[in-house]
Amino acid sequence: MKDEKSLTGSRIIVAALEKAGVEVAFGYPGGQVIPLYDAIYDAKFKHVLTRHEQGAAHAADGYARATGRVGVVFATSGPGATNIVTGIATANMDSVPILAITGQVPTTAIGNDTFQEADIYGITIPITKYNYLVKEVADLAQVLAEAFYLAGSGRPGPVLVDVPKDVQVSSAAPPAPSPVEIPGYNPAPEVSPEQIEAMLEAISHAKRPVAFLGGGAVASGAEKELFRFLTESDIPSVSTLMGKGAFPEDNPLSLGLPGMHGAKYANLAIYESDLILCLGARFDDRVAGNVRRFAPTARVVHVDIDAAEIGKRVDAHIPVLGHLKDVLSAVLAKITPVKRPEWLRQVEEFRRANPLPVPESGTEIKPQSLIKAIDAIAKGKTPEEDAIIVTDVGQHQMWAAQLITSRKPRRFLSSGGLGTMGYGLPAALGAKFGRPDLPVILICGDGGFQMNIQELATIREHNLPVKMVIVNNNCLGMVRQWQEFFFDKRYSATLWGFMPDFVQIAKGYDIAGRRVSDPAEVQSALKEMMDAPGPYLLECMVSPGENVLPMIPAGGGQTDFYGE
Ligand SMILES: Cc1ncc(C[n+]2csc(CCOP(=O)(O)OP(=O)(O)O)c2C)c(N)n1
Ligand SMILES: [Mg+2]
């Protein structure tokens, strides 16, 4: 049916994105999305053409993590769609709201092994919050409204909408927008007063409480409530990779990163605590390797917006279902401020006796000292102006997690749950599109940089002043470390037979760069990088044999430190 008011599926998609307030989307065209790209030609939002679909997916993710808004990625059918699978799985593991729109072969051709056909709907069922294959153009507007709502509400996550080519070209009258109601989906469960009472009671009896902050503490936007709660109740906190910056890490009540490569003092505080207040974290095995030896004498309050997380790995004595902002507001309305001088003295003693290792050398750049120097240069005049730090995956990521003191939420972006090498460079460019007002600094390994190196072209095309630091240890450092510790130093496939010249590569992309190997040059090189008007690549040659310590081997309890 075609009347004057009808629009093609492609135009309905573009209109839905415009209506949702999308400012920028990332993608890559192909045969089954040519009609969609024809509509994008006139779109009010900016389309950023990356150099690989994986880059587009991670860029949408970086944009979403930096802003809290839904990131959008487009890809064509078949290989385009399968190229975004890693980006979708990365976003899913870290609860990042992205909307992926893929082209599909025409509905009549589905199932025929048609050219560039892949069942991306089937492939992404287990790695999306929800996904759709749209068979009728009349359904498209409603599906997109639901997709945005699902991605961004409750516990955020990726949603995929697969749109066959005939649906893109056929027309429907845009339906009047109807409010999205999804039976059984409750993104804002009401907080139970009994659960709040039980939580308050546990806090009032606790002598040694520790708040365990996860990604939910960032996603909930409960920064102010959390600050009041922790400071008024004198509760020390640890934050996971996802929770960094939910509470300012330069505050004496912050103990930084817990878990496998967390600070010893963070793990000792957890181990000794009598109350774990888990706020939007999921007791991931990289944090709680052995749940029985995590906090053996503690009661556990587990606050989460997703009921499926509560009791998944650790039994909660007090489950609290709800949005963290609502839960903390309810708690703050009733709580009486207390001081805990004894417990905080003990925690300070843990910190004093077990500092994070930051070796220095006059002859080689120690990666830990490099990260410390980046932390200093990333600080703004106020925390509001602090740079966004984006990492890749490996040793450099763990040093960054330990030593970067995040003072605001959404300023430390890293692939946590999936641990996706190649995430950093495209995520940094996405973050810069989301927050052009803030400096964006990428900390990346020599391995991970080569996994999406093609996005240098996207960075250059848009002249994005992304500051890229390659921590070049001449190896796949994190795997090399495991081989050193647990496989008799048999370095299978972790020491490169060839290393490219990254500064020359940057030059090929018309990006300024410099290589340093003298520790005396680090400060001036970082300053030069920050002062450069455009993108800049700083390759730092660091000691190759350095290990990330402390380390709790996989499956270990909070005091099972390697080598002790
Ligand atoms: C896509 C992907 N492949 C493989 C791995 C396994 N892995 C984890 S860390 C690592 C080494 C990373 O090396 P590099 O990027 O140089 O960082 P470094 O550890 O040296 O700092 C590897 C291979 C991974 N996390 N992701
Ligand atoms: Mg390396």
Image (cartoon, grey):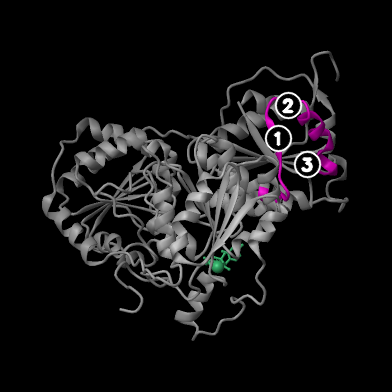
Q: Is residue 237 above or below residue 74?
A: below
Residue on which disc 1 sits: 47
Question: What x and y, as percent, mark residue 547?
Answer: 43, 72
Q: Quadrant of the C terminus?
A: bottom left
Cβ of disc 2 within 8 Å of ligand 1? no
- Circle 3 SS class: strand
- Circle 2 SS class: loop
Q: Is residue 394 above or below residue 437?
A: below
Q: Residues within 10 Å of mark 1 (few under 14, many from 20)?
A: some
The magenta span reads 29-55
Instruction: Identify which amino acid the numbered label 2 is placed on.
Output: Ala
- Decide if residue 253 is on the left or right side of residue 151: left
Q: Are marks 1 and 2 in contact (CB under 8 Å)?
A: yes
> At 50% across and 68% down in the image, what residue appears?
542
> Can residue 443 be seen?
yes
- Decide if residue 276 is on the left or right side of residue 441: left
Q: Is residue 14 above or below residue 512?
A: above
Residue on which disc 3 sits: 103
> Can residue 84 be seen?
no
Number of numbered discs visible in the structure rendering: 3
For residue 43, which numbered disc appears in the image? 2
